[in-house]
Image (cartoon, coloured by chain):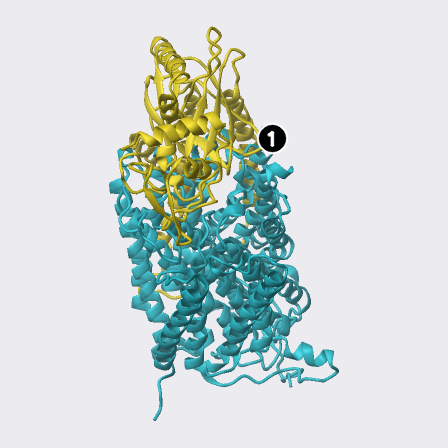
Amino acid sequence: MRKIVALSVAVLLVTWLLIVGLDAAHVMPVEASTQAVSVDWMWKLMEIVMSFLTALILVPMFYSLVVFRRRKGETGEGVHVDGNTKLELIWTAIPLVAVVVFAILGGGNLADVLRQDPNAMVVKVTGHQWSWKFEYPTDPETGLTVVSDELHLPVGQQVLLLMTSSDVIHSFWVPEFRLKQDLVPGRFTKLTITPSEVGNYAVRCAELCGTSHAYMENPVIVSTRDDYSAWLSSKIQEAKVAATDPVGFGEILVKQNGCVACHSITGAAGIGPTWLNLFGATVKLSDGTTVTADQAYLTESIKEPQAKIVANFTTQMPTYGFTDDQIAALVAYIETLK
Amino acid sequence: MKHNPLRNAFVFLLAFGAVGYGAGLGIDRLVTGDFHFSGAVAAAFALLFSVAAFFFGLYGYRGVTRGLTFQVVGMFAGALFVTLIRALMGLKAFDAFLFSEPAWVFGGLVGAIAFLFGVGVVSDWMKWARGIDTPEHHEDEPGWRKFFGVSLDHKVIGIQYTVTALFLISVGGLFALIFRTELAESQLQFLTENLRLFDQSGPQLYNTLMSLHGMIMIVSILLGIAGIMNYAVPMLIGARDMAFPRLNAFAYWLSVPAIMLLLMSLVLGGFDTGWTGYPPLSARAPVGMQMFFLGVFVAGWSSILGGLNVIATTLRMRAKGMSPFRLPILVWSALAASIIQLTATQLIGLSFQLVMFQRLFDMGFFDPAKGGNPVLFQHLFWFYSHPVVYVFVLPGLGVISELLPVFARKPLFGYRWVALSSLGIATVGSIVWAHHMFASGMNEYLRVPFMYSTMLVAVPTGVKFFSWVATLWGGKIETPTPMLFVLGSIVVFLFGGVTGPPNAMVALNLHLHDTYWVVGHFHDTIFGGFVFPFFAALYYWFPKATGRRMNEFWGKVHFWLMTPSFLVLTFGMMFIGLRGMRRRIVDYDPAQGFDHAQLILTICAFLIAISILIFLINFFRSIKHGEVATGNVWKSRSPEWQVPSPMPAHNYDVPFEVVGEPYDYGLAGSKYIEFAADGAGKKH
């Protein structure tokens, strides 16, 4: 009996030490959304569960290894005990009860992070290989829609991300917001986030999506409501100007679609050919022929990326479904890169 | 002059590798008009030629060499056949990797079937079909040569499985070391954009190696448990062999062409989907994807037939008096694992086959543009791929329960509970698959029941842990190498187990999913549930197979080097995972501050590799030079240790009868089995 009491005390002590250790290690990133608070509450609970279970098994195990080890010169066998039905019932029943308790807690916790505000701001998210595109609510005065490759969010306002993919499955994850949701082609998935801390974060794709999956990373900026409004109106202003200037429009499209993730404008090597000094240059293709990078060639390469592949490039560029106006603007922009 | 066969093998490997490379280069030049020195075609030819030549040098033109030759010829014949038809139909005959995708797929399939004819594993069945009788048993060659041809002896097949598994573990581990080295530092060091190998850039090659690491390890585990089950089950239950010896050999030999196909996927442009092969990404990947699908499909057949055999053997061939609750405990978990293998493997084969057909015949099963549903694939895939982790760990947990009483010198605590908990785990494990899909976009509410069922797995698993601890309590514990690995299994599997519940809680899972946390968690479960018990089993039954034992000192070095390195590796993975490190990425943002941790992880990976190398040297050296051990080395009560080692060809000369409980250590005068006293019923 004294052994049992001593062991119980040791189990509790080790549990406590493990919890303190895990707490001190600060394993979770900054909490930047109200959902993160709920998730972290569950994590704390799980720290206790993990610590207790570890101690519950390891303490008596190592105790046995020391106390019941065969000493030098010792003969004979262990005590002949082959089971105890009462004990087996206890260590089946108690975990069963624990499972029911955690099922209830887990369900409630899920409801907390899914709770939706009817006044949530809706941002449309499109993932594509290998960048993100965010469409903000249409401006009621000008009728213009701001599209950006940056996710700007006002603090304290719940946002409903309405997400889809134009090619393969991607996954939206900002570790500081905690929650993760896949983007599936052909359907919309939802994620609600209420940012709670002003700051700069990054959204990184969490579902393997091909060659440059590791670099599918765009900025997320949580700012005060005023800063957010200022940013949004500057973008609307930009969009107004762009409508009258093809080169400027092309530049905005390039930003919105994350083209530079593959095509550098500085001459640096990338997944796709650089655009610097591309217009008018002679390009060697993978079938051995050459072609001049003129209006027609560039238009074709944007519309049908597989038609002509540049030598030494393997990655297949996806089609983006640009309109003719947009393509003309893109080509006009590429022409300026000298 | 006497040649060393192993030296011959390597000379042939290099020579024919060079010949194959040259041939591939030349043919590629003829078709494309250009030399591709690091291209797929030259590499594919070099791979096929060198592997076949290696076995030719070792063993001559028979058995496995003949099988591989048939596979190579079959593959090219099949591919040329489709190419010819395509040319006649006016379709594009040749493509980037010499043959078109349909030609490679058909060639791969024909090659795998041709292998089985070449190796000779179907010749008895073919003879029977033609009305020709064959002897019931075939005598094996003496010495090591019997392992390279078709044998019907379950012990030979068990060793074939085990050594193939060790080879594959080394290949998969090598892949891991390559990408682990790249990950040691942020930014790209050698897997760069400018690299071109097998028509893949650095990041693409990373994706291929990472994906193949997963599937090659999975296949190696399936082969490893098949090795344990094949070798041990008939011996433990007192059977002369498995229920269907020819089917048993057939199942093993299926795995060899499957491995060749998996390796072909590396050189034929690779693939970038991970071992999970989710469409639409897998519908767009290079030809390597199809070779991967085909390889898994063939390996799946091997697993299904192997499982069938274990079930039939356990149900029908037990010794007299061996009632269900007097079975050696390992047989219970082998049975539970085999039921999963027999009933769930079809689903991964099916899901991969559907993507294969989507690519070949433009059937839009998972293509949203054609009304297909990419999430459906994930359900089909995980319906097998979750239960399969219990195929990996149940035999391992069985090894723990089997060996603990031997070294604690005490009965297994709560035998019936431990036995039934295996079936409990297998049952509950079949209804938890969608917990891999909490973030997938499936119905939101469906996540709740899967959270409940997932947590339920903790109950039967807990029974095992408590019973193990209670078995140790009050024992006279000895710790030779096998026992060290058993104890290591319990500790490592415990860490895999306790990190499970956080994944089950849906909201928390949405943070943990697809991060290094999960990578750390499942490496703990697989090492604790398979790798450590596998090593324990190898050290434990090595004397039974060879009549010698492995070196104890180097066994302990292996253990004490591997265990701490591995724990640091997985704890480190979990830590950076929680901080935001995603899975399956070739590079990470230096701003996230993972550089130091990643360097430590890489060092740990190399330490583990060194410890495995020590094990391999010890293993192969001890076959010839180990200390002689023909008796009951571990003082076990188990029937196989009551006869001298190594075990003769048809197991027990005299049948035994079960007269007591299997694990009654410490009960004076008790006996588990008794051999028929007068040799009555002595086998012919």
What is the count of numbered marks? 1
- Looking at the rendered structure, the secondary structure element under dot 1 is loop
Residue of label 1:
B443
Question: Which residue is more in the foreground, A199 or A149?
Answer: A149
Query: Subunit of mark 1?
Result: B
* Residue situated furthest bottom in the rendering: B1
Where is residue B482, by image quadrant? bottom left
Relative to A39, B398 lies left or right: right
Q: What amino acid type is highlighted by mark number 1?
A: Asn
Q: Can residue B631 be seen in this view?
A: no
Question: Which residue is more in the foreground, B359 or B84?
Answer: B84
Q: How crowded is mark 1: few (under 14 residues within 10 Å), some or many (20 or more)?
A: few
Question: Which residue is more in the foreground, A331 or A132?
Answer: A331
**Colour assignment, chain B:** cyan
Residue B231 percent across, percent down from the top left: 53, 70
Residue A251 percent across, percent down from the top left: 36, 25
Q: In which quarter of the image is the N terminus of chain A?
A: top left
Q: Quadrant of the C terminus of chain A?
A: top left
In this rendering, the answer to whether A311 lies above or below B267 is above
Residue that appears at 53% across and 60% down: B295
Residue that appears at 72% across and 84% down: B132
Residue B99 percent across, percent down from the top left: 51, 61
Q: Which chain is yellow?
A: A
